[in-house]
Amino acid sequence: MHHMKKTLIIVAGLALLAACSSPDKMTKQAENIKIECVPPVLEVVGGTIDATVSVTYPEGYFNPGVVTEVTPVIVYEGGEASMKPFKYQGENVRANYKVVSSKGQTVTENVHFDYVEGMEKCYLELRGRVLAKGKSIPLPNKKVADGANTTYMLVKPAANVAFKDGEYLEMVPVTVEGQIKYDLNSAEVRNSELKSASVKEFQQALKAALADERAVVKNSEIVAYASPDGSADLNDKLSSDRSGSAGKAWNTVTKGIDTAAPEIRSVGEDWEGFQKLVAESDLEDKDLILRVLSMYSDPAVRESEIKNMSQVYTALKGEVLPELRRARLIANIEYKNYTSEELLDVLKENEDILDEEALLRAATVAKDAAQKESIWRKAVSKFDSGRAHYNLAAMYAAKGKDKEAEAELAKYGVPDSDALNLRGLIALHKEDYKAAEDLFRRSKTESSKLNLGVLLILTGQYEEASRVLEGAPGCCHNSVLSLILTDQLEKAMSTARCGDPKVWYLKAIIAARQGNGDNVKKYLERAFKNPSLKERAARDVEFAGYEF
């Protein structure tokens, strides 16, 4: 019985309030208003702060004849930012604001602010006033949220690029050969042929290769031919006989030179050699001959067509055909190219002997950025190397030197996936997020994937960022951050592998979110090797209530 009476008194009290809620009384009764903010700690996402504020007015509070004005304000170190005020009216007011009933009502509004440096230490408050009968009566300021979370800003900037290496051969193949010429229809090796300049050069090259510790003779071969005149059967036999006599000659030629036995082949009629010699000759009718060769593939038809051009045939008999009665002595040698260390030595001593591929490889193995840059410049000035232009562009794009990067990229001029990634980075630096995202997605390289992860964090697409960055190579910083932002704290902790101060800072955030004060302290001590992180921690809402 007693309990019921008490309840009645409260209700009666509220009814009394409803009957006479003057504008002045609204100020005095303001503590009866309930305010809720979601999230209770503001969060910066993609450079903006968004929250939902609900204000619950009790029954009998809102005077039917007044207008109220409520201004959300963020107060932070260094200033304040306010939104356009929200206006509300009582039931009896004839205006176009949101009506609030005197019977009590909850009003929900979205607040939106652009982040300004310093807002991590801030609070959001509502400032109100009652407008009635030409008077403006201030309402008490109501604090609704404390601090703004800027953890996503710990993202490591996107600077992932791939450099192009030279097509540099570890082993350089070199073929040396000598020729033995035969008389018409003969398979006999003349003595003079064994002493010919061609054979002598072959012997010298073989000896030099065997004496060179960088060279290996991989294999050797003898290839014998007949000139394409006369019957094909006869020529096949002739070519085969020549391969036999050349095999014996090989032993004489390589006497005292330690080589393995050659592989011996017989080709028969040498139409390929014939075509090459005619093409290189200055015979008057060479185009005619080449046309015959392209029109007919049957050797007998080819030969009779060419013999029909009797004048041509006479010239061929003198100049071309004797060159094709031959056996080739061939050695395939591999030279060990400069090692990485040697390349850098050659650069110091005599860089002019390096070709484009060797320069690009030297830049790849060079220790510092300045040296890499100077080698690429050398490749550009000497060979107008497209890949060196690209590498310079990549170096500039990673450093945020966008003008220089664009100029070098234009000289590269190949719209490949690497170039798309660089263009994405340049767009990202200009905060053209839409273009950057499109370019990274089209690039599909390892580098662009890492850059896309950064962009997704910057634009508040945390879920996808955590998927894109999963298993990212190298330092795991952004991957850990994306897992914190999606509240995957256990996984974030096990991903945090590297001992960089910024990663220790992220681990401290995980510990704070898990409520593990000892670890917060331990991890922050390691993070504070970077003094800027100490300054940050002092204002970081993640560590509100922790002493360090």
Image: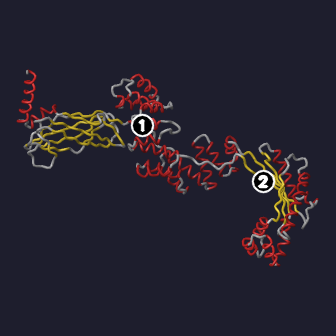
Where's residue 470, x and y in %? Answer: 48, 39
Mark 2, mark 1: which one is toward the viewer? Answer: 2
The image quadrant where one finds the N terminus is top left
Q: Which quadrant is home to the C terminus?
A: top left
Q: Residue at x 91, y 54 (%)?
A: 248
Q: Residues within 10 Å of mark 2 (few under 14, many from 20)?
A: few
Is label 1 in a helix, a strand or a loop?
helix
Q: Which residue is mark 2?
A: 175
Where is residue 519 drawn, in percent x and y?
42, 24
Residue 300 shown left or right of residue 192 in the figure? left
Instruction: State the residue position of label 1.
Output: 154
Residue 141 found in image quarter: top left
User: Which residue occupies the foreground of this view, 282 or 321?
Assistant: 321
Q: Is residue 42 above or below residue 434?
A: above
Whether residue 479 sits left or right of residue 239 in the image: it is: left
Give the amino acid at mark 2: Thr
**Residue found 76% across the figure and 48% down from its top:** 334
Q: Residue furthest right?
A: 191
Q: Is residue 31 above or below residue 45?
A: above
User: Disc 2 on helix, strand or loop?
Assistant: strand
The picture places residue 473, in percent across and down from the top left corner, at 53, 39
Q: Is residue 438 left or right of residue 134?
A: right
User: Looking at the picture, which amino acid does disc 1 mark?
Assistant: Leu
Whichever of labels 2 and 1 marks the residue nearer the N terminus, that label is: 1
Answer above or below: position of 293 versus 456. below
Query: Relative to residue 271, is residue 197 drawn left or right?
Result: right
Q: Nearer the viewer, residue 302 or 36?
A: 302
Q: Nearer the viewer, residue 463 or 539?
A: 463
Please tell me which residue lies in front, 308 or 428. 308
Numbered badge on residue 217: none
State if disc 1 and disc 2 touch (CB < 8 Å): no
